[in-house]
Amino acid sequence: MAVLIKGATFASGKKCDVLIESNKIAKIAPSITARAEEKIDAHGKLLLPGFINTHTHTGMSILRGIGDDLQLHDWLWKKVRPAEQKICELDMHAASLLSCAEMVRSGTTCFNDMYFHMKGVAAAVKESGMRATLGYGMVDLGDEKKRKSELAIGEQFIKEFDGSANGRIKCSVAPHAPYTCSAELLRASAALAKKHKTRLHIHLSETRKEVFDMLKQTKMRPVDYLASLGVLSPNTIAAHCVWLTKQEVGTLAKHGTHVSYNPVSNMKLASGGAAPIPEMLEAGVNVTLGTDGVASNNSHSMFECMKIGALLQKQSRWDAQAVNAKQALQFATLNGARALGINAGEIKEGKLADIILLDMRAPNMQPVRSMESNVVYSAHAGNVTDAIIDGKLVMRNHKILTFDEEKAIDAVQKAADRITVT
Amino acid sequence: MAVLIKGATFASGKKCDVLIESNKIAKIAPSITARAEEKIDAHGKLLLPGFINTHTHTGMSILRGIGDDLQLHDWLWKKVRPAEQKICELDMHAASLLSCAEMVRSGTTCFNDMYFHMKGVAAAVKESGMRATLGYGMVDLGDEKKRKSELAIGEQFIKEFDGSANGRIKCSVAPHAPYTCSAELLRASAALAKKHKTRLHIHLSETRKEVFDMLKQTKMRPVDYLASLGVLSPNTIAAHCVWLTKQEVGTLAKHGTHVSYNPVSNMKLASGGAAPIPEMLEAGVNVTLGTDGVASNNSHSMFECMKIGALLQKQSRWDAQAVNAKQALQFATLNGARALGINAGEIKEGKLADIILLDMRAPNMQPVRSMESNVVYSAHAGNVTDAIIDGKLVMRNHKILTFDEEKAIDAVQKAADRITVT
């Protein structure tokens, strides 16, 4: 199938036509005449690579608003965990589908997910037309039997789903965190990722407590601990990375490990501090952006992540130049693609056709001095009009084409009522 | 004119009909049958009081993106001030109209503005159907001649526009800041506000530099200095208030002065620190929210202000309970109305009919556990479908009814190209 986009404005300000053939960007030129099953008039619209959200738990949309304004410990143990016990695979499918709707509507075309009942998530990805890297979140808390069963579930999921949905689904190995996984599970995870040539997705140094607990237990800080177990590599995506020393930043850079910066979640859960993004950039770490799950954000908007991610750095450094609009936009696009190892994140011939269009004529997008500035500091999810993923139209003129949102919404509200713990 | 809203959901979760007669909420009941020129089917929609933005410079939309990611000093003196010199009254009208479009689209029904060429702003308010408190921003930098002319312009504007547009426009006395206005101008401003029974709108303690300069010059901190000049009263709205001691917070409370918290602008300009909102609440200060001008935000979205305003407090205090969703929503509605002295900010019979509707069925607004949480942490401007101001429909189904947005956009882009300083 071919899609022809006419008269779109690029972030550079240039106007071009874009021809999509199969799932790739086939041609970019000032004027293209070609046969195409779909033609999109993009005059007055800004064309961008779709956003890549590198840390999600999409099934958590079912928990939206469940433990707001609570300390992390109460949020987790009194609200989130008890509700999670009641979530079944069907709930997970509906919740992930709801998240897909929210993500597409806010310009995200690809996400990196870790949770449980991942078959439900995979089904939602397949149905929605999105692109995703999915991993079963493994936790053993030092229990050997549990470790074996977790690894078995994790590997089975990879065997069944890696490369599925025409390659839109890739799988990862996803040990939850250094403090919930034994050293053996972390080592085995690294080996499993190597064996299946997948990404490894893990939480890292989200809170100060985690760092000090780790120091007590292992005499190492979390990054050094993971490095000692062979977990850090260019295939690793580490989420959060708030509480790092400069030396740990250097270790991440040395191993080529990708960082998923989650500013909104970190601020909402009051993790304290701010991830040392300027130091990461200086050391050459590939910085990307994640929303985290909706229970701790409570939104999947990458617009919020870009803006708040830049603002948090400026605010905590007293430096208005820390993280600029261009950098924030790159975190959300090209850097995300690099982290996940997908041929996307920029608008170039030969790249995957994961593309969004934004209404440049919306009053909040005017006047235009810098497209990047307006996208990062002024835009919101409602400005996204169209989304193309893997060469297929997933949203056109604010209408999702691939699945029934209303059905997903009703299913999630019903399940949410059932699982809420009061 | 009467407007009948059928089947709206309130923030409490209750469903009601709302009858608007003339410019007031006449009746709220589970089912109302009445003759009405306009009927709105609000099933699946959340009905809220419109947001009240208590610190804006709406004309600054013409400067959107002009000095991003720059330190405040460079931003102000190299980018903003030179461009401002070239703005004429017609530009101001177009820019304010653009801001009105952006504000209505993001759920704001009333704003508190201070800038220059204020006749252009008043014309935009009149045309757009919005409600506003407008003041000419006076600056004398110690020059007596200038002081007299500034006071004359400020008073003339009040005489001409206070109570105009059927009472939708109120005027304020707006001395810019303690560091740009002489003690004489500040005293005269307080007297002028008393004489005309208007609000007094001023910037206060935005940066640390301001505090230390003031200490050097007057041996007083800014709040104490304003108190000594008689500037603080229950008619005063002080914007920013970032760098306050606890004792200064007490002084604001004692005088009944209202605070406009501007979290996005403060973070973007890297003012450092965070306004002591929990202390203000404890002391009984009326806390409201402002976006500030678009050149330092770069958006008029009160959704962003509510969310980022809560997140910044949580983050800087390491306390997830600091400022909850209910409080943030109240800052943006009822507290704003109190600050401006208008009979709005809540949905009650007898209140002014300044009302917005939000699409509750949008995926980012589902599931619903707490309406307040979803509005503050999950919603975005694109979720606002309808706006009624002073009893009149200003936006219906995302369409602005009162003026031509496209015309304003074209005029602003043209003017922006002319005034940009490179």
Image (cartoon, coloured by chain):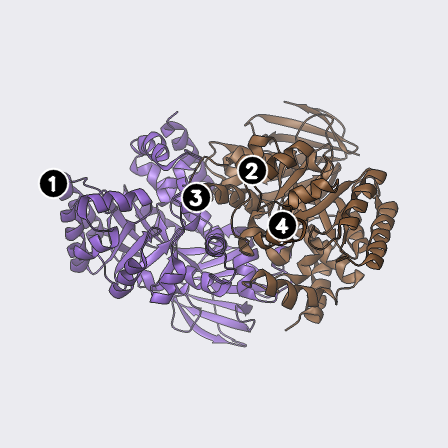
Chain colours: A purple, B brown
Locate the C terminus of chain A and report the quarter of the image it occupies. Answer: top left
Mark 2, residue position: B246
Query: For the residues tagged 3 and 4, is the chain the same?
Result: no
Locate the N terminus of chain A and report the quarter of the image it occupies. Answer: bottom left
Q: Residue at x 55, y 42 (%)?
A: B306
Q: Chain of mark 2?
A: B
Q: Viewed as shown, does residue B69 lie left or right of A226?
A: right
Q: Identify residue type, mark 4.
A: Leu
Mark 4 against mark 2, which lies toward the viewer?
4
Mark 4, residue position: B215
Q: Relative to the observer, which residue lies in front, A338 or B115?
A: B115
Q: Secondary structure at mark 4?
A: helix
* Image location (x, y in percent) of residue A413: 43, 33
Q: Secondary structure at mark 3?
A: loop
* Image location (x, y in percent) of residue B407: 73, 60
Q: Are marks 4 and 2 in contact (CB under 8 Å)?
A: no
Is residue B108 visible in the rendered image? The answer is: no
Q: CA distance from mark 1 to mark 2?
A: 54 Å
* Image location (x, y in percent) of residue B90: 79, 61
Q: CA distance from mark 1 to mark 4?
A: 64 Å
Mark 3 against mark 4, which lies toward the viewer?
4
Q: Which label is found at residue A297? A: 3
Mark 1, residue position: A144
Q: Identify residue type, mark 3.
A: Asn
Q: Chain of mark 3?
A: A
Q: CA distance from mark 3 to mark 1?
A: 33 Å
Mark 1 against mark 2, which lies toward the viewer?
2
Q: Identify residue type, mark 2.
A: Lys
Is residue A89 visible in the rendered image? The answer is: yes
